[in-house]
Amino acid sequence: MAATVKYDEVETGQEIPPADYPVRRANLVMYAGASGDFNPIHWNERFAKTVGLPDVIAHGMFTMAQGGRFVTDWAGDPGAVVDYGVRFSSMVVVPDDEQGAVITVSGIIEEKLEDKRVVVALTARANDSRVLSKARAVVQLS
């Protein structure tokens, strides 16, 4: 598989349109099962509040994964991401209602590198807060 985005068709400063990723409590339970992280702050509202959180919060790595998903959806090939890193800057609070939370991710081509690689700077927001900072992916394009 190869990236569907062509290196010659992107420019530094080019924006990648935002995408919304809904988060419900069920998503967090499924993620806990897949990751093995069953910390009750991610599924038990009563416990989360007793330790000072406003409500259940999404796993940091779940939040990071939504940024990775954004990049791989854009590139068209999960194998095109050759490096990816973030810092966690805020929590994604996930209420137990019909809406849950939404993580909105957008990107910009920050730099074009050699060998048809680009650096994509990501912005991820939820609940009016930036939830990832210094989020960058190096992507191998066609």
Image (cartoon, rainbow, N blue to C red):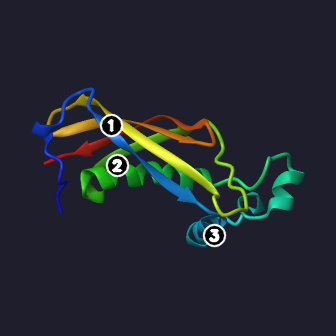
Residue pointed to by mark 2: 71
Q: What residue type is labelled 3?
A: Ala
Q: In this view, does 139 lie to the left or right of 126?
A: left
The answer for how far apart the CA atoms under marks 2 and 1 are is 8 Å
* Residue name at image x 59 percent, y 71 percent: 30
* Residue name at image x 56 percent, y 51 percent: 102
The answer for how far apart the CA atoms under marks 3 and 2 are is 24 Å
Quarter residue 139 falls in: top left
Q: What residue type is labelled 1?
A: Val
Residue 86 lies, in percent from the top left, at 49, 40
Q: What residue type is labelled 2?
A: Val
* Residue name at image x 81 percent, y 55 percent: 48
Give the structural element (helix, strand or loop) at label 3: helix
Give the mark toward the camera: 3 or 2.
Answer: 3
Give whichever of discs 2 and 1 has the lower sequence position: 2
Q: Do the residues labelled 1 and 3 touch (CB within 8 Å)?
A: no
Give whichever of discs 1 and 3 has the lower sequence position: 3
Residue furthest right in the image: 50
Residue pointed to by mark 3: 26
Residue pointed to by mark 1: 120
* Residue name at image x 32 percent, y 54 percent: 72
Q: Is residue 3 left or right of residue 101?
A: left
Mark 1 closeness class: few <14, some 14–19, many ≥20 residues within 10 Å? many
Mark 3 closeness class: few <14, some 14–19, many ≥20 residues within 10 Å? few
Residue 73 lies, in percent from the top left, at 32, 55
Give the structural element (helix, strand or loop) at label 2: helix
Q: Are marks 2 and 1 in contact (CB under 8 Å)?
A: yes
